[in-house]
Amino acid sequence: MTVTIFGIKNCDTMKKARAWLTEHGIEAAFHDYKASGIDRAHLERWCAEAGWETVLNRAGTTFRKLDDADKRDLDQDKAIVLMLAQPSMIKRPVLETNGEVTVGFKPDLYAQIFA
């Protein structure tokens, strides 16, 4: 099984997700999209599979600090442009397992994925 976890190194949720994977003996490549960036193709695929509303982290400070004009009339294309410009707006973690995409970390969900 090919597993890649995408996120930001210092995020607490990322630390929990990576620790869960390690504790369960699951090897995962880590892609820090704040340090290494992310391409449009990944964001388009994640939005197509999970929905842009799920992928865009509206609760984070980066999104909340945006001008109201940038927050208004959001759609998938506008959300992708925002996330490309500021990857901190991508919800964390994004887990890819054999082509499947899971956004966010919940131990029970990870247990189902790797059962």
Image: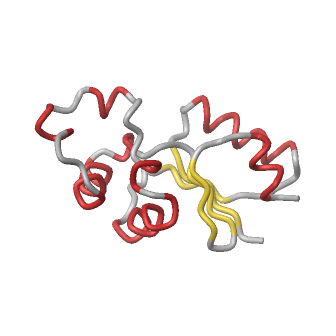
Q: Is residue 68 left or right of residue 52?
A: left
Between 33 and 113, the one nearer to me in the picture: 113
Q: Quadrant of residue 88?
A: top left
Q: How many marks?
A: 0
Q: Is residue 18 left or right of residue 14?
A: right
Between 73 and 57, the one nearer to me in the picture: 73
Instruction: Locate the N terminus and report the quarter of the image it occupies.
Output: bottom right
Q: Position of residue 47 (x, y in %)?
A: 43, 61
**Residue at figure coordinates x 24%, y 27% from the top left:** 65
Residue found farthest to the left: 69
In the image, residue 45 above or below residue 93? below
In the image, residue 106 above or below residue 54? above
Instruction: Locate the C terminus and report the quarter of the image it occupies.
Output: bottom right
Q: Is residue 75 left or right of residue 101?
A: left
**Residue at figure coordinates x 25%, y 61% from the top left:** 77
Q: Position of residue 86 (x, y in %)?
A: 30, 45
Q: Position of residue 23 (x, y in %)?
A: 86, 42
**Residue at figure coordinates x 23%, y 48% from the top left:** 74
The colour scheme applied to this rendered structure is secondary structure
